Amino acid sequence: MALQNNDFAFLLPEFPFLQDSGFQVTSNPDQLYNCIAWAANDTSKWWWPDEDGDGYWPETVPRQETLEAFISAYATLGYVSCDNGEPEQG
């Protein structure tokens, strides 16, 4: 059975602008991976910089919940920071 957007109403208090964004459900919830992993194209493990080392995190990146740490983690995959939020051509 396919999930509908209203199946995710529990997200709206945390993300109040989500409903107006026209979001689409693209997969069922999964305990194996989170949105950080999904954005890294990795659906085989949970990405998080927890100090206990329970989640996966690139070895060369400090386990800190900071914007800089997340930027560095994605940089290990070839992502680069951009000057603005506009989509790039292609």
Image: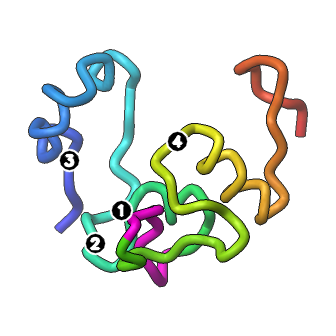
Q: Which residue is mark 4?
A: 66
Q: Residue under circle 1?
A: 27
Image position of 87 (left or right of 22)? right
The residue labelled by disc 2 is: 30
Callout 4 secondary element: loop
How far separated are the C-alphas under marks 4 and 2? 24 Å
Label at residue 76: none
Residue bounds of the magenta highlight: 43-51
Q: Position of residue 31 (x, y in %)?
A: 26, 75
User: Magenta segment, principal secondary structure?
Assistant: loop
Identity, as a three-letter code, of the amino acid under mark 3 = Gln
Frontmost residue, 6 versus 84: 84
Q: Residue 11: which quarter of the image?
A: top left
Residue on which disc 3 sits: 4
Instruction: Answer whether residue 90 is magenta in the image.
Output: no
Whether the residues at callouts 3 and 1 have beta carbons within 8 Å, the answer is no
